[in-house]
């Protein structure tokens, strides 16, 4: 269905995804590629409302509730923002996507990976991801960059063991080819250059 390209950027907390997605979108637009920046969870009104619920520490959904809430937000985001943009030929840059569900609800929370893959497949159909990048830095470096975990964010209250499992999940997805790793250990400009080099390959 894609007329435009769908590009995903993944990473652990503080990897610089938000910053890099914005830099990439600006670079693409400056180069004459009509690009749209969006994010998950969120990116559309209902999905942004679900995001608030998901990150609110007053709630304690179990792993399945998380999976379905992230998936519901995703479907709304795709219907309202991503599908129309791709049909109009735009290139969409998305900050997090289905790989985060595998990493957090699968590796982090322990849900069955094949089950999550099935849910992801149904949720995003008929979308095909053109490029999925993983900004590779460890959770320790990411949290140090952020100046520590944000205690107002429910997910960031998890233990370092949890984030270690999430990181391993992303690394496994790099090893099996679902994600393409990008070195994120250098300055922002160096990471941006690494990302642009990967994106050039699909445009
Ligand atoms: N989640 C899930 O469980 N399941 C799902 O299916 C999905 C998501 C889609 C919200 O995501 C939470 O939802 C997230 C995963 C879960 N959970 N947690 N925890 P989010 O994307 O909104 O939250 P985040 O990953 O925590 O975002 P973040 O902390 O803002 O990280 P970031 O976007 O990768 O980083 P940044 O804001 O661009 O940069 C962070 C800081 O590092 C900032 O001060 C920068 O100036 C600095 N920085 C950035 N790059 C560099 C370099 N290269 N050097 C030095 N400093 C740097």
Image: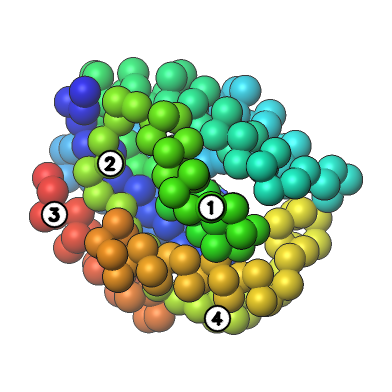
Left or right of residue 73: residue 123:
left
How many C-alpha atoms fall within 10 Å of the one at disc 2: few (<14), some, or many (≥20)?
Answer: some
**Residue 112 has which mark?**
1
- Residue drawn at (38%, 54%), measured in percent from left and top? 9
Circle 4 or circle 2, nearest the eye:
2
Question: In terms of sequence position, does the residue under pointer 4 or pointer 1 come before the other?
Answer: 1
Closer to us: 128 or 20: 128
Instruction: Give the spatial CA distance, label 1 vs label 2.
Output: 22 Å
Q: Can residue 97 be seen? A: no
Quarter containing the N terminus: top left
Q: Can residue 161 be seen? A: yes
Instruction: Give the spatial CA distance, label 3 vs label 1.
Output: 35 Å
Q: Position of residue 179 (x, y in %)?
A: 31, 59
> Whereabouts is ligand 1, in terms of quadrant?
bottom right
**Residue 200 has which mark?**
3
Q: Position of residue 137 (x, y in %)?
A: 45, 76
Mark 3, secondary structure of its residue: helix
Left or right of residue 197: residue 85:
right
Question: In terms of sequence position, does the residue under pointer 2 or pointer 3 come before the other?
Answer: 2
**Residue 141 has which mark?**
4
How many C-alpha atoms fall within 10 Å of the one at disc 3: few (<14), some, or many (≥20)?
Answer: few
Mark 4, secondary structure of its residue: helix
Q: Position of residue 57 (x, y in %)?
A: 83, 50
Question: In terms of sequence position, does the residue under pointer 4 or pointer 2 come before the other?
Answer: 2
């Amino acid at each position: 269905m894609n007329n435009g390209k769908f590009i995903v950027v993944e990473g652990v907390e503080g990897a610089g995804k938000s910053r890099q997605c914005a830099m990439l979108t600006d670079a693409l637009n400056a180069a004459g590629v009509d690009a749209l920046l969006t994010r998950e969870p969120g990116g559309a009104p209902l999905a942004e409302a679900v995001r608030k619920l998901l990150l609110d520490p007053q709630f304690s959904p179990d792993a399945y509730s998380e999976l379905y809430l992230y998936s519901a937000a995703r479907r709304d985001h795709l219907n309202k923002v991503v599908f129309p943009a791709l049909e109009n030929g735009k290139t969409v840059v998305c900050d997090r996507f289905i790989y985060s569900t595998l990493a957090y609800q699968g590796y982090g929370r322990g849900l069955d990976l094949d089950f999550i893959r099935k849910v992801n497949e149904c949720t995003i159909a008929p979308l095909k991801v053109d490029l999925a990048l993983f900004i590779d830095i460890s959770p320790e470096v990411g949290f140090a960059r952020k100046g520590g975990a944000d205690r107002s964010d429910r997910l960031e209250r998890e233990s370092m063991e949890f984030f270690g499992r999430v990181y391993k999940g992303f690394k496994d997805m790099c090893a099996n080819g679902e994600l393409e790793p990008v070195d994120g250990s250098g300055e922002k400009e160096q990471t941006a250059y690494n990302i642009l080099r990967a994106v050039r390959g699909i445009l």
